[in-house]
Amino acid sequence: MRVVWIEDARRDLESIYLFLARVSQKAAVRVHNGIYDEAGKLSLSPFMGEAMGDFAPDHRTLFVKPNYKIVYRVCDEMVVIVAIWDCRKNPDKLRKTIN
């Protein structure tokens, strides 16, 4: 299955990288690559993430350590990455992001 990133999700990943790079370039690369690698695994196992239930019934999340979730949906033969979410943020903002 093909993994597709929408532009907002790409910006999320870039923002995380830039924020972390101010403190540690090494940490920024590690987190960026970790998120990207985990998203790639969805091509082989698209339902490995947890369903979001009533919060967003057609979306799933995949937890990526230390503090991030990949928010995605499975459509036809694609996994669509819609957001990279920092779990320390208010979840109400996530609802606005994906709806």
Image: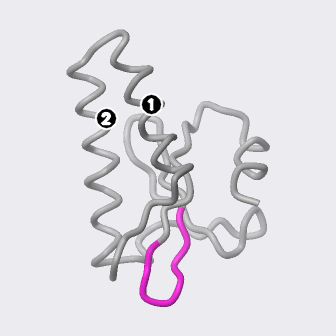
On the image, numbered disc 2 is attached to which residue?
A: 31
Question: Which residue is depicted at the point 43% across and 80% down?
Answer: 78
On the image, numbered disc 1 is attached to which residue?
A: 16
Horizontal side of residue 25 vs 77, given as left or right: left
Horizontal side of residue 1 vs 86, given as left or right: left
Q: Nearer the viewer, mark 1 or mark 2?
A: 1
Question: Which residue is depicted at the point 75% across and 41% down?
Answer: 93
Give x and y (percent) for residue 85.
55, 43
Question: Which residue is depicted at the point 56% across and 67% down?
Answer: 60
Look at the image and say whether residue 75 sits in the magenta stretch. Answer: yes
According to the image, what is the colour scheme of the structure? one colour
Give x and y (percent) for residue 16.
44, 31
Amino acid type at circle 2 is Val
Label ID, residue 88: none
The quadrant in which residue 29 appears is: top left
Look at the image and say whether residue 31 sits in the magenta stretch. Answer: no
Circle 2 — which element? helix
Question: Which residue is depicted at the point 71% across and 50% down?
Answer: 97
Q: From which residue to which does the magenta span run?
A: 72-79
Q: Are marks 1 and 2 in contact (CB under 8 Å)?
A: yes
Horizontal side of residue 45 vs 6, given as left or right: left
Give x and y (percent) for residue 66.
39, 35
Amino acid type at circle 1 is Ile
